[in-house]
Structure formats: structure tokens, C-alpha cells
Amino acid sequence: MADLKRVPSIAAEVVDLLKAHRTLGGAPNEELEWLAAHGELHHIDKATLLTPRGEAHPFALAGLESLIIHFSGRMVLYADHGAGPHKVMEWTDGDVNGYLPYSRMSGPGRGEMVVTDPIDALLVHRVHFPEMIRECPWVTTTLVHVMLDRARHFRASELQDEKMKSLGKLAAGLAHELNNPASASARSAHLISEALNQANAAARSLRTAGLSDAQFEVIDRVRDLCGEGTCAPQTGLAHADREDALAEWLGAHGADTTPAAALADTRITIEMLDELAAAVTGPNLDSAIVWLANDWAARALLSDIERATTHIATLVGAVKRFTYMDRALTSEAVTVAESVDDTIVLLQPKIREKAIRVDIQIATDLPPARVIGSDLNQLLIYVIDNAIDAAPEGSRIAISAEQAHDRIVVRVVDHGAGIPPDVRARIFDPFFTTKPVGRGTGLGLSVARHLVRRNDGDIEVDSTPERTEFRVIVRMYANEAPLR
């Protein structure tokens, strides 16, 4: 780690450097002279100022107590909020950082400061700030704006981190949810090809067999009866007995017993098979059975593909609505029931893993909310995901929404252990979490509160052992008919 070097300075030279400074160069000359007289020039070579273990370099410690006016070099802040280290902010020549007037900064924060290019900077210790505020109004005003911009930047970075973390969890769940129907569709498509090949071969045999119109009518009638739908649900044992009975009949009539498995899923009966055997015999009966079985199998596989692709379309639609793709970040009429439904669809893998029952009670005539749609969806996913984490396996989560004057109140209730009173006051604080290391960043509820307040709403919590209720309160969309 490089040593911190204090550089002897001449006030006139420092003033010249300050006049060329991008942020403070426009200050009156007497204010620049005041900074030069009360600051100390420092130089630091390339080094890590703050290690991941929180051991601070002298320059970093000095920066926590001082205004840092950068003349040259480059300093970068890296942070890890649970999604891996990434650059949050950087300062180069012409920038200002460190302790600023009216700042509440009390520590180095969660991150690592790295000097990537050697730095020359003027440090003004905070003990001089009361005098600076009196003597340097232009500089003080400028620094307050810098502080506000920095706070907004950090907040935006935290929001983006939490969004990416939330997106990562959703993507993992969706990948699993999409993989199952996609794999089923691919498997069914392959099996359809085999079923159609066998059905076509059997159909060619029947066409060249010289069967009469009456015989074809019997085959078609049995086929129509087979295609009316599947049998009533059966136990595994009952289905096996039915398949054995069909195989026994086929064997007794000299036909291949392989189609028995497919025929067991249809409504075909022994009486229908007897009618078919009375109309066609020998190899023609075998061909008719193969054609019937594979025709039914192809239809069943097409139904499987339809169900799978419909499920995929439902998931994609939920994601599109949830993210408000191609929609501006403006308040609009949002159907709360649809937002809740889409959130539950995206959290379904986690809900299924814990065998949790989700009860939703939202009146169909509930007025829409006036919110930024993506904000409502994101804060709902934080609150409901929290409830899933807290709920015991096999328990229930209740979600409801109602109108209260000009507001819409969404309630999410779980029956977990509850939030202790000494913890409840801190659950919305950034970086506070009760989850094990690696499972929570402590940003979810903080971000949720930021989002709901950005929409002129609020979030509240009541908790007792075995019952915790979060309430998301947003404005009602006035003078608008319900969207659902």
C-alpha cells in the first residue's frame, strides 16, 4: 500500500490550480484564497485505499474527515450489494468528494476505494467548515449541490443493484419454469413424428386391403369415439389393469399388443373392439388397431404441445406486463389484481418449493391505482417474496386489496415467526437484514419504501408472533372506471 504524502504548497500556486478546477473554478477569488489557506496538498500513488476487510488507508481516513478537491488522478468506488463488485462512482481531476458541508457521512460505507491513477488533491478538514460556510458562500452552495447529486447517484445505484438482484432471481425461476414446457414440447414433437409415421403406414395397408365402405364406417366410428376425450381420472393400478385387459384382448385376436398403452388413455371399450373385430379381421384388424392407437397418440401429443406453449405464452405475457416493456415511467391507471397475479406467476417456483398456498381476494370492481406500473410490480415482488421467505413450509399467504377513501390498500399476510419489536423499526433501513449471509442484501424493503413513496404512497407493517401484515398504500386512479 502506497504511503500518503503531504506536499508543501504555495498559496498562489494552489489558487491557480483552483481557478482551473472544473467544479470550483468559478468561485470568487477571495473564496479560492480561503481554500488555499486552509487546505493541505496531498499526493498518493496507485493503491487500494479501503480494503474489503474495511482497513482504511490514511488518505481514505483523511477523506472521511475532509473535503477532497481533485486536481489530477482517478479514484473509483467499488461496491458489492450481493450481486458482485461493480463500479459505483469515480472521481477525476475537476471533481470534489469526501466530507461535504451538511453531510451526515459517518463511515467509509460498503465498498472499496481504489486509486487507479496517482492523485494530487487539496484536503480541507471539516473543522474549518463553520468558517467556510460563513466566508465562502459560493463554494458552500456549489458543494451542497455536489452532495445532493452524490446522494441521488448512490441511491440510484442501490436501486439498480437491487433490481438486478431481483431480476437474477426471477430469471433463474423463469428459466426453470420455461424449461419444463419447452422440453415437453420438443419431446412431444419428436413423438408425434413417430406416431404419424406409424399411422400413415397402417393407413396405406388399409387402403390397399380392399375394405368395403361399411368396414371403413366402423373404423371411423370407433376412431371418433376414441377421440372424444380421455378416460376419467384413474389410479395407477386401475390404469394398469385397463391396459392389461386391452393387451389381453389384442393378443387373443392375433393383434400386436403394443398399442394397448395408447388405447388405455382413450374411451375405447372392449365392446367397441368387438364391433371392430366383427367388421375387419386378420392383418386388417391389426392395421386398424395400429392406426387408431397412433392417431389418438398424435392428437394427445398435440394437446400436450398446446398446453405447454400456452403456459410459455402465459409466462412471457406476465413478464412483459410485469416489466412494463416499452412503457414510459409515468403514473397511469394500473389494475392491482393483474399486478398481483403476474407477481405470483413469476414467484411460482419459490411458492411451489415451499408448498405454500396463496389466497388472493381482490374484488373485480376495485378501482385501478394511479402509479408507475413497474414500480408497483417491483415493490409487490419485494413484499411478497419477503412473505414467502418468512412463511413456514406448507403454510398460507393471504393477499387482498381494498379501497380506502382515495387510496388502494394491498395487504400481504404471512404466518411466520413475526418481526421482533426491536427489529421492526429498522427493517426499512438500507443494508439491514435478518437473513443469513449471502441470502439478503438489506435493500429490498428499503427500495420498496422508496418506490411506493415515489408514487405518493406508503408502506406499513404490523407483526405479532405467527402473523405479519405488510400494507402497500397507493393512490386510487380518480374518475376512471375499473379496468377489470
Image (spheres, rainbow, N blue to C red):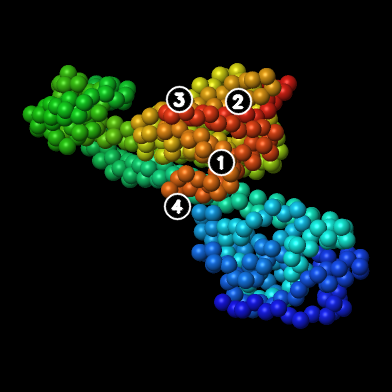
**Measured Cα–Cα span from mark 2 to mark 4:** 32 Å
Hey, what amino acid is under mark 4?
Gly
Q: Element at badge 1? A: loop
Quarter of the picture holding the N terminus: bottom right
Who's the residue at 66% across and 32% down the image?
A: 457
The image shows residue 463 at horizontal and vertical percentages of 50, 30
Few, some or many residues within 10 Å of mark 2 (<14, 14–19, 20+)? many
The circle drawn on residue 438 is: 4
Give the mark nearest the N terminus, 1 or 3: 3
Hey, what amino acid is under mark 2?
Val
The image shows residue 113 at horizontal and vertical percentages of 61, 66
Q: Element at badge 2? A: strand
The residue carrying mark 1 is 426
Give the mark nearest the N terminus, 2 or 1: 2
The answer to whether residue 93 shows anywhere in this view is no
Q: Nearer the viewer, mark 2 or mark 4?
A: 4
Between 147 and 37, the one lying in front of the other is: 37
Disc 2 vs disc 3: Cβ atoms closer than 8 Å?
Answer: no
Q: Element at badge 3? A: strand
- Position of 337 with respect to 281 (left or right) is right
Q: Nearer the viewer, mark 2 or mark 3?
A: 2
Disc 1 vs disc 3: Cβ atoms closer than 8 Å?
Answer: no
The circle drawn on residue 476 is: none
Who's the residue at 61% across and 35% down the image?
A: 376
The circle drawn on residue 409 is: 2
**Measured Cα–Cα span from mark 3 to mark 4:** 30 Å
Disc 2 vs disc 1: Cβ atoms closer than 8 Å?
Answer: no
Quarter of the picture holding the C terminus: top right
